């Protein structure tokens, strides 16, 4: 296995344009065995995401059609799967059915992952280059004792706006755990934060659930079995997280997570002319110190072309969302 170490990429998505083709282009150039499992569709606010119900979160019917994407993602994924038989698998619920939370979504492909290797979670708006994926796999080949890896990201809150703190909002201590050594039989016990467990670990953690406790992380930050964010950053493994670059993304988060007024606040942020600004001054759900500056002034350009924000209004000297 050490000689091949295939990579199982895992993405859950609803309305993932225009990011999908970046991912498949990055994967196509990889010089090792890989398989992309994409789980598409709308998920109920249950399990790990149930917290958003208290803030008014809801599944907006305008965001899906019979549980499927409405922005062309469904059709794009079908075309990608046809073009890559045996390498891209799309997992869906029957039309008209929603996933039982994101936890069911991430567990759905595991039975199809029959070979040990790496499991690399790639959210649809998290962009890696081919070179980064190659270096990340090489780290695990060079260190067979390591079980997982944490990363930092460039956290975008607009097409040309990025959070500049290294260890605050967008790059907290539990972020971003994205890669694990995988063995058939492993399962997800939680999605937020992500907890991938072996059969034995899953059995032990059943007791925690019986006692009403949340699952315990199997490789928490600081665990010597995991590559730290400092270690992966030294290898250039800092990905682009285009979290708030499209109006459609912000509109979805406003309804799904109950972020009241998110779209109007995001538009105001795009109109800011005096930078840097504090993100918490615009997004009330941000409590940390998170300065925002121009991405281009820091040499950062999104890996996919993005439309300019519409209806941003007059340029002002204020702040923004996350």
Image (spheres, grey):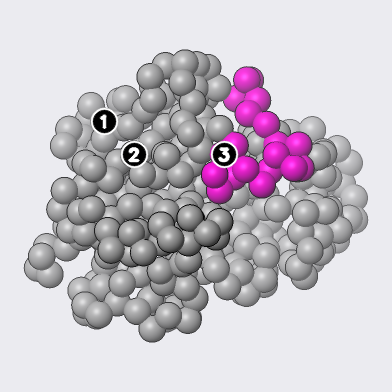
Q: Is residue 34 left or right of residue 59?
A: left
On the image, numbered disc 2 is attached to which residue?
A: 108
In the rendered structure, does residue 58 fall within the stretch colored magenta? yes
Residue at 16% over, 63% down: 5
| Badge 3 element | loop
On the image, numbered disc 3 is attached to which residue?
A: 46
Q: Earlier in the sequence, mark 2 or mark 1?
A: 1
* Magenta range: 45-63
Residue at 67% over, 71% down: 168
Q: Earlier in the sequence, mark 3 or mark 2?
A: 3
The majority secondary structure of the magenta stretch comes to: helix
Q: Is residue 65 left or right of residue 291?
A: left
Q: Quadrant of residue 276?
A: bottom right
Q: CA distance from mark 3 to mark 1?
A: 29 Å
On the image, numbered disc 1 is attached to which residue?
A: 81
254 lies above or below 169:
above
Residue 262 in the image: state x and y as whole percent.
Answer: 77, 41
Residues under numbered marks 3 and 2 in contact, where contact means CB atoms less than 8 Å apart = no
């Amino acid at each position: 296995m050490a000689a091949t170490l295939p990579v199982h990429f895992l993405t859950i998505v609803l309305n993932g344009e225009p990011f999908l083709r970046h991912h498949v282009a990055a994967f196509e150039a990889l010089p090792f065995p890989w398989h992309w499992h994409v789980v598409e569709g709308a998920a109920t606010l249950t399990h790990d995401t149930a917290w958003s119900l208290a803030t008014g979160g809801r599944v907006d019917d305008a965001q899906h059609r019979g549980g499927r994407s409405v922005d062309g993602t469904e059709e794009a994924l079908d075309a990608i799967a046809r073009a890559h038989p045996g390498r891209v698998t799309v997992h869906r619920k029957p039309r008209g059915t929603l996933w039982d939370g994101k936890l069911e979504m991430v567990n759905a492909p595991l039975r199809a992952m029959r070979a040990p290797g790496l499991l690399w979670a790639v959210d649809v708006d998290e962009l890696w280059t081919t070179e980064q994926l190659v270096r990340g796999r090489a780290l695990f080949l060079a260190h067979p004792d390591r079980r997982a890896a944490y990363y930092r990201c460039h956290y975008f809150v607009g097409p040309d706006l990025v959070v500049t703190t290294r260890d605050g909002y967008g790059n907290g201590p539990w972020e971003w755990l994205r890669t694990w050594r995988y063995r058939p039989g492993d399962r997800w016990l939680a999605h937020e934060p992500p907890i991938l467990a072996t059969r034995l670990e899953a059995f032990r953690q059943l007791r925690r659930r019986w006692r009403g406790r949340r699952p315990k992380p199997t490789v928490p930050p600081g665990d010597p079995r995991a590559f730290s964010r400092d270690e992966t950053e030294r290898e250039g493994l800092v990905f682009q997280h285009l979290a708030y670059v499209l109006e459609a993304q912000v509109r979805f988060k406003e309804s799904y997570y109950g972020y009241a007024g998110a779209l109007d606040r995001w538009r105001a942020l795009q109109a800011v002319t005096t930078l840097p600004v504090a993100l918490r001054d615009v997004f009330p759900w941000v409590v940390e110190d998170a300065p925002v500056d121009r991405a281009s002034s820091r040499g950062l350009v999104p890996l996919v072309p993005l439309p300019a924000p519409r209806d941003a209004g007059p340029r002002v000297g204020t702040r923004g969302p996350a």
